[in-house]
Amino acid sequence: MSPEEAALARQALRSAEGCARRLARSQGKLAAQFPLLPARLTALPPDVEDDLDAFLKRYEQLVNAIQDELFKVVAIVGGEDVRGLARREVVELMDRLGALPSAASFRLLVAIRNRIAHSYPDDPERQAGNLNAAYEAVPDLLAAHEGVRRYLERRLPKGPFP
């Protein structure tokens, strides 16, 4: 791995760490709101709606950072070429390499991300279900991030990287 690749890898790690930290903060801030019931969802004050929007965005950002950035770094470090692989195959590879706690768990996290990416303003029951699923999945998402982070920290060259 070149020094430039190592620096980019460290940058991706720092970015994902920021996403994870902000998601954990959002989860804590919203703890009193969960589980969300459909009737309550339609009557939330604007500040809580804003907090939920931030939570959902942070969940989405962390999933994306892991699968779009960190998985590439893991592949580079492991000498794997993932360019021709489907995302599902990349997740399986990450599991085989030991960078993820579970491929099945990560696929579920991605499925939740895909569901929350769509808003259903006329279906509070569906919205509440998606929000509750995302909230409940945060520990698994943080564990996936931590697994990839630890994997990379053990394998990245040490040095003065920005």
Image (cartoon, helix red, strand yellow):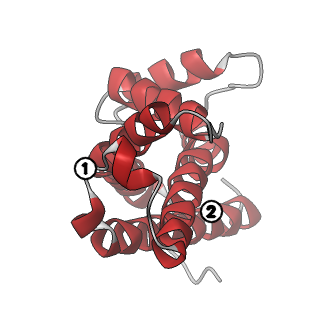
Q: CA distance from mark 1 to mark 2?
A: 32 Å
Examine the rendered structure and indicate whether residue 137 appears above or below residue 47. Answer: above
Examine the rendered structure and indicate whether residue 23 appears above or below residue 104. Answer: below
For residue 137, side relative to residue 162 (left or right) = left
- Residue type, mark 1 in image: Pro
Q: Nearer the viewer, residue 43 or 10?
A: 43
Numbered disc in front, either 1 or 2: 1
Q: Secondary structure at mark 2?
A: helix
x, y percentage for residue 47? 51, 78
Q: Nearer the viewer, residue 35 or 103?
A: 35
Which of pointers 1 and 2 lies earlier in the amino acid sequence?
A: 2
Residue 103 sits in quarter: top left
- Residue type, mark 2 in image: Ala
Q: Which residue is mark 1?
A: 35
Residue 27 sits in quarter: bottom left
Q: Secondary structure at mark 1?
A: loop
Examine the rendered structure and indicate whether residue 79 appears above or below residue 153. Answer: above
Residue positioned 23% across, 68% down in the render: 32
Q: Please give the label number shown on residue 12.
A: 2
x, y percentage for residue 149? 41, 56
On-image quarter of the C terminus: bottom right
For residue 103, side relative to residue 127 (left or right) = left
Q: Please give the label number shown on residue 162.
A: none
Q: Residues within 10 Å of mark 2 (few under 14, many from 20)?
A: many
**Do we see residue 52 in this rendering?**
yes
x, y percentage for residue 55? 48, 62
Residue positioned 67% across, 69% down in the render: 7
Residue positioned 57% across, 23% down in the render: 90
